[in-house]
Amino acid sequence: MSKPILPVLCVLFVLATACKEKKDTAKQQNTAGPVIVDVLVTAPQSIDNKIDASGTVVAYESVDLHPEVSGRITYLEVPEGKLVTAGTIIARINDADLQAQLAKSKVQLELAEVTEARDKKLLDINGINQSDYDIAHNQVASIKTDIAYTQALIDKTVIRAPFNGVVGLRQVSIGAYVTPANVIATMQQVNKIKIDFTLPEQYSSIIKKGNTVDVDMDATTHQKRKAIIMATEPQVTTTTRNLKVRALLDGGSANPGAFVRVSVNAGEDKKALMIPTNSLIPDDKNNQVVVIKDGKSTFVNVTTGIRLANNVEITKGVNAGDTVVVTGVLFVKPKAPVKIRSVKTLKEFADINNNVQPQ
């Protein structure tokens, strides 16, 4: 009788030991301390309602100097990097054949004018009929038209500066055969500077001709200048849904093509509920924050507004006076108890993110 009872007792002992270990583990998990967090008590704060955009410096006038006709360059004067005035001759194309044609037409014109004058006198005394005189008169007009046409072709062999500006680097040499596809040099009018930048289309209502924007010309010194909005592109870019804006820089100089930072005033400063950006929990559909109520965590869906360097505006989901978890967000579970280590301000959180030592 004792032999069958012994295995049963062993099994019962093993089961009892396993149950005890399971209960002890659950007890340890249940008695684990609450997550320690740092929090921020939300309060309305005044923010500078400005939108930052990337911009590009554009010359007030810019052109590639191309020849209008094909031919060999017989004259070339490209003062690289220097200012030239409008009308200055930059290059000439060989026009010997056109000059010969012009000289021929001028000789023909002289003879035609003499013939017309003689026929006019004969017409006055009824020596010839009107049709004979009309032929002579038409011959004069035809030759004059040929001269004008030839002169226009000669003018196309001369490349002139179209405006006052700085000439770029020379791209060809004298004696080279060029076509209208060749670039002789470039010209930029840099005494006035335009700034091109783009903004999301939802800000189109704040972009008006004559408004001013701030332009950060130097990333090192953060030198700011004003620019006056000249115009906007009527059509929104279909790929980015951005609106292209052009502004005229008020003073200052910069190299065309340089990068600048543009700040657009989106309205008067306003009161907003701001929280550190790293306290947001991104989701597929919504952003969430953790709010502490009665010592426990609550996950709340929020709507964001203006984003700054370290902070983001909350327009919906959080009220003034709510306690928002900022550090330890990843370790907090819904409806779980939390322990507040410290209550900090936005500036203190910004200093922590920027590794600024407290004073």
Image (cartoon, grey):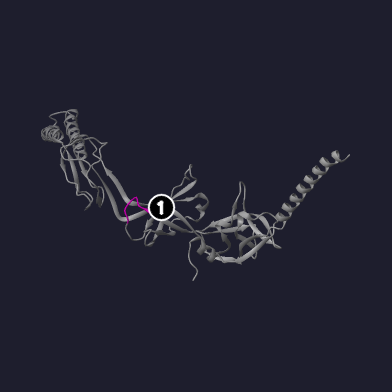
Residue pointed to by mark 1: 55
318 and 155: which one is in front? 318
Which element carries disc 1, helix, strand or loop?
strand
Residue 317 or 324: which is nearer the viewer?
324
Q: Position of residue 216 (x, y in %)?
A: 40, 59
Q: Residue at x 61, y 48 (%)?
A: 283
Does the magenta stretch mainly form a helix, a strand or a loop?
loop
- Residue 330 in which image quadrant: bottom right
Percent across and percent down for residue 303 are 61, 54
Residue span colored magenta:
254-259
On the rendered image, what quadrant is the N terminus found in?
A: top right
Three-letter amino acid code of the residue under disc 1 = Gly
Judging depth in this view, the residue of 310 and 201 nearest the camera is 310
Left or right of 207, for residue 287: right
The location of residue 353, given as percent across then percent down, is 51, 60
Count numbered badges in the picture: 1
Given the current orientation, which residue lies at the most extreme right position? 1
The reply, left or right, for residue 250 in relation to residue 125 is right
Of 86 and 177, which appears nearest the observer? Answer: 177
State whether residue 78 is above or below residue 121: below
Q: Is residue 157 left or right of residue 53?
A: left
Residue at the (29%, 54%) spot, across then down: 190
